[in-house]
Amino acid sequence: MKLHRLAASVAVLTLVLAGCDNKAAVSSDLTTPAQKASYGIGLSMGKNLSEEGMDDLDSQAVALGIEDALTKKDQRLTDDELMEAFGFLQARAQERMSALNDKIAKDGAAFLVDNAKRDGVKTTESGLQYEVVTSAEGAKPKVSDVVSVHYTGTLIDGTVFDSSVERGEPVEFPVGGVIPGWVEGLQLMNVGEKYKFYIPSDLAYGAQSPTPAIPANSTLLFEVELLAIVGEPQAEDAATVDLEATEAVDVTKE
């Protein structure tokens, strides 16, 4: 995590709290708008810091720093001391994240080795693995086609990170506008078929984490039903598009 992100989070929190009714006593009931807003900002900041590997911060010390700023007290540590502490925590968070990313990559590779041995699982030259769940005699899409699909995406531990099935609404997108594992896999399918894709990280997002739900280096599993080929992409679809415009995970390529 960049140091300025931590500093910015604290600065935003301080500014908002300063505009609230901070004379009110802190209450676990969180009844006033100021208390509710203050709690929400702190909760959001805490989640963001935790996701960045800063989950060992001392919440009481954070509250003390905010209190000193709001009451205009002299800061208890020098700027040099603060920067040294920030640097230490940043380095440790990066070490933890690097170790976690390495583990995720190794676990994904091991999963694919074992998965390739299962009956019905086929592996392409690129490393994409797929399994036919339901066969059909429909047409195959081309890379230039727009398709309609239902899908559910999971991590190798079974955690669902996105599902058009759960939302109850299929999605449409250009075949050539999605991550490489999907581009290849969709062109193997006939309309009406359902496949399982087992996508190595280098055919998905690689070392990037597109959302906290999908860690870097993740091997991704998708159950995909090809519902229809709906036509050629329009001009505005030439660029990459989201599978779902709202909260769905974007499996489109960067």
Image (cartoon, rainbow, N blue to C red):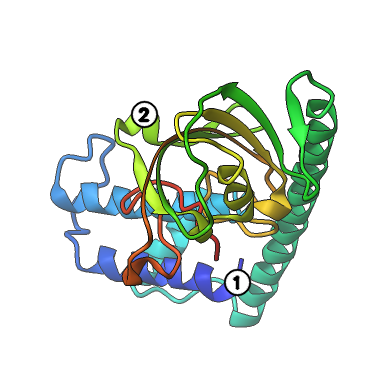
Q: In the displayed structure, would residue 47 be above or below residue 18?
A: above
Q: In the displayed structure, would residue 192 be above or below residue 105?
A: above
Q: Which residue is drawn at 48% across and 57% down?
A: 62
Q: In which quarter of the image is the N terminus?
A: bottom right
Q: Residue 166 carries which label?
A: 2
Q: Residue at x 68, y 45 (%)?
A: 218
- Inspect this view and state whether residue 71 appears: no
- Report x, y in % for residue 18: 25, 68
- Inspect this view and state whether residue 209 appears: yes
Q: Residue 2 carries which label?
A: 1
Quadrant housing residue 238: bottom left
Depth check, front residue: 216 or 184: 184
Q: Which residue is drawn at 36% across and 44% down?
A: 171
Which amino acid, mark 1? Answer: Lys
Depth check, front residue: 56 or 164: 164
Give the SS element for disc 2. Answer: helix
- Label 2 vs 1, first from the N-terminus: 1
Which amino acid, mark 2? Answer: Glu
The total number of labels drawn is: 2
- Answer yes or no: do the residues labelled 2 and 1 have beta carbons within 8 Å? no
- Report x, y in % for residue 193: 51, 29
Q: How crowded is mark 1: few (under 14 residues within 10 Å), some or many (20 or more)?
A: few
